[in-house]
Image (cartoon, rainbow, N blue to C red):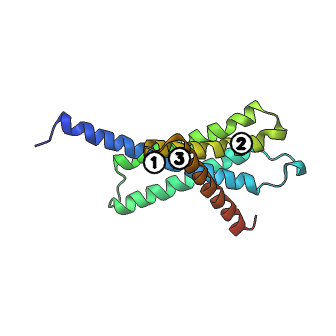
């Protein structure tokens, strides 16, 4: 039998991997949606867009909508109950969303208004590409193949952001 501490260690590692996956999934989702929102903003010369408002409004809105949907669906499949694992997953998702919002806020704090929105987009694009690079390297790809994969992940993310805006009429 494999009960006891030896069996608990792999189960704990599997749970940690699942929670990291939840955090990264939400972080990528928020990054793509933030890119779409920033792309849809009017030309920066037409007036200053409130960068913090866009970053945190989109992030909090998505996080709340996701939390609500996640909680309702957890109860649906959990016979009316929310399991401890569901609460941990929701926490990991919230952490992923907040991490991206904090990352996107850095250019707003450090740079002048005239360049902050472009830099926020660049930071979000870099984050998405970096995740793609890490995925490829984790799968054993060379640096050059990982860079190509990162660029393809970024291209797909940007296509999704542009498609979202195009379908919404922005």
What is the residue that sits farthest to the right in this orientation? 46
Asked which secondary structure carries label 1, the reply is helix
For the C terminus, give its image quadrant: bottom right
Alpha carbons under labels 3 and 1: distance apart: 26 Å
Given this view, does label 1 or label 2 mark the residue nearer the observer? 2
- Is residue 159 positioned above or below 55 on the image? below
- Residue appearing at x 68%, y 55% in the figure: 36
Compare marks 1 and 2 and give the one earlier in the sequence. 1
For the N terminus, give its image quadrant: top left
- Is residue 163 positioned above or below 107 on the image? below
Asked which secondary structure carries label 3, the reply is helix
Q: Evaluate whether residue 61 shows in this view.
A: no
Compare marks 2 and 3 and give the one earlier in the sequence. 2
| Residue indicated by mark 2 | 120
Given this view, does label 2 or label 3 mark the residue nearer the observer? 3
- Mark drawn on residue 145: 3
Q: Quadrant of residue 6?
A: top left
Alpha carbons under labels 1 and 2: distance apart: 23 Å
In the rendering, at what x and y percent does residue 98 appear? Answer: 57, 41
In the rendering, at what x and y percent does residue 108 appear? Answer: 74, 36
- Residue appearing at x 55%, y 50% in the figure: 149
Q: Are marks 2 and 3 in contact (CB under 8 Å)?
A: no
- Mark drawn on residue 22: 1
């Amino acid at each position: 039998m494999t009960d006891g501490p030896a069996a608990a260690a792999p189960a704990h590692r599997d749970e940690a991997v699942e929670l990291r996956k939840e955090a990264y999934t939400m972080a990528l989702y928020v990054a793509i949606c933030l890119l779409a929102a920033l792309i849809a903003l009017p030309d920066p010369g037409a007036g200053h867009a409130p960068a913090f408002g866009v970053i945190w409004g989109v992030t909090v809105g998505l996080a709340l909508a996701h939390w609500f949907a996640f909680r309702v669906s957890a109860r649906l499949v959990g016979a009316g109950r929310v399991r401890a694992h569901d609460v941990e997953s929701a926490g990991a998702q919230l952490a992923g969303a907040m991490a991206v919002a904090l990352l996107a806020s850095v250019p707003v704090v450090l740079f002048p208004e005239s360049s902050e929105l472009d830099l926020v987009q660049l930071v979000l694009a870099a984050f998405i590409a970096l995740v793609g690079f890490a995925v490829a390297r984790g799968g054993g790809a060379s640096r050059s193949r990982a860079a190509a994969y990162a660029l393809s992940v970024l291209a797909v993310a940007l296509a999704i952001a542009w498609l979202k805006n195009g379908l919404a009429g922005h």
